[in-house]
Amino acid sequence: MRKHPQPPPRIIDPADIPEGTLIDGEEKPRRRRVSEPRDTAAGPALAAVICPIGHERAVNGDQPAARDSAAVLEEALGLARAIDLDIRIAETPPLRRPVPATLLGRGAVERLKTAIADQHIKVAIVDAKLSPVQQRNLEKAWNCKVIDRTGLILEIFGARARTHEGRLQVELASLDYQRSRLVRSWTHLERQRGGFGFLGGPGESQLELDRRMIEARILHIKRDLAKVKRTRGLHRAGRKKGAIPTVALVGYTNAGKSTLFNRIARSDVLAKDLLFATLDPTMRSIRLPNGQRAVLSDTVGFIADLPTSLVAAFRATLEEVVEADLLVHVRDVAHEDSERQRHDVESVLRELGLEERIAEGDMIEALNKIDLLPMAERARLETVSSTGRDRSSVFPISAVTGEGVDALLEAIGERLSAADAAIEVELPLADGATIAWLYRHGDVRSRHETDDRAVFTVAMDAETKARLAHRLGRELA
């Protein structure tokens, strides 16, 4: 069977890229030129981004068809820009069947070898999961550093982590990733250390020693993260004791969670048009339109093929999502792959053990960035959200302009109020101990005083209500 010659890879001349144009030729607003140098003396590393198309990622049975190749390439370019790489080559080679040795076919490897040499590429990013053998073979073939999707995301997380907890979590995931690649990373690992006795012997190889050191460091980090987990558990117990519910914002990276968080909480969390702009979780106390207090949590963004090691390492942080009283899924409805991103987020939530919440629809969807949609599409979303079965769980909003945010907050308040019903409690003003107990264990929403008595409207769960009834010695309505 005659083989058709493959076209040469596209070489990108930074001088030929006008503002507002993507590498694949689509006209879209962009943050900056891909070749704009960092403010460093050495300058950014020259990079190639290779997105194999046709190598399907593992998906759930109810997920839509494979993502558009242009959207896949744009996301990979966004990840590369997040660590300021100077992208000179961008290609989406077809991949009908993965090759065990190199993932890519021999023809694609040879074509890229020539292009990488001509452009003096230092880093090649393969937007797929590479085995240690595949990574080593590609590095030998292309004579440059090769990073797969997992390694790239780890690089981004390492650059974004600011808190001690965040740095520990990233280091844990990185060590877990590296220990299977020690034989690829170093050239001195075959050396032997002396054994016992006068003559020594084979002893312990450097590879075994390094692997043992990594294992010891992993155990040390896990102990530190266990302390973080206990501290977070105490904080959650304190909030539950005070009947203060938690609302967690979840969503695909760059969906606008931090912008929405800033608008609701009047905060100043970093919000940029950048993948994984924020990594460390942030929590703020807010007051909802119905007067109820709540804690709003801004979590790390999810992404397709989020490394399992990262999910495991960030479990202490992501427990805020698991334990939240209400989840708000922030979606970028202006993105061409919005529906696919929704399934990717739900896949991570399932991995965290939240299958029942997803199945029961126990989540609010905030359809963000409607200010970027055409008027006809905006009108359709508003009609769908105001009628039908989704009218109480889907809300079109714009975190930038504030449109629809008030309706979203009212819905959040209604959901939380339904979970913790408010009751009226009448107490004498002289009973200061019980009044203080109410403020400590319940969410006091209003207080009306007469001459010597006060009527409180307070929200609390069933267990706290039973304790109050026992304290007062009477049944409560």
Image (cartoon, rainbow, N blue to C red):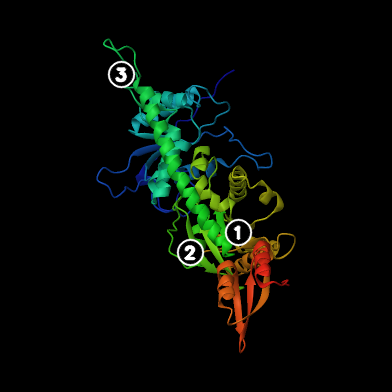
Compare residues 450 and 276 and report the one nearer the observer: 450
- Quickly name the residue at label 3: 193
The residue type indicated by label 2 comes to Asn
Q: Position of residue 412 (x, y in %)?
A: 62, 65
* Mark-to-mark CA distance, 3 and 2: 56 Å
Q: Judging from the image, what secondary structure is the residue with disc 2 in?
A: helix
**Dot 3 and dot 2 residues touching (CB under 8 Å):** no
Q: Look at the image and tell me in which quarter the C terminus lies.
A: bottom right
Q: Is residue 402 above or below residue 326?
A: below
The numbered mark, 1 or 2, whose residue comes first in the sequence reads: 2
Query: Which residue position holds label 2?
Result: 262
Task: Residue lying at the far top in this picture: please name it.
Answer: 199
Q: Residue at x 42, y 31 (%)?
A: 215
How many marks are shown on the rendered structure?
A: 3
Residue 367 image label: 1
Mark positioned earlier in the residue sequence (1 or 3): 3
Disc 3 crowd rating (10 Å Cα; few below 14, some 14-19, many 20+) is few
Can you see residue 251? no
Residue 164 x %, y % = 39, 49
- Residue at the right extreme of this rendering: 388
Please report the residue visible at 75 percent of the width from the left and 61 percent of the height from the top. 388
Residue type at mark 1 is Leu
* Residue 310 vs residue 134, the one in the foreground: 310
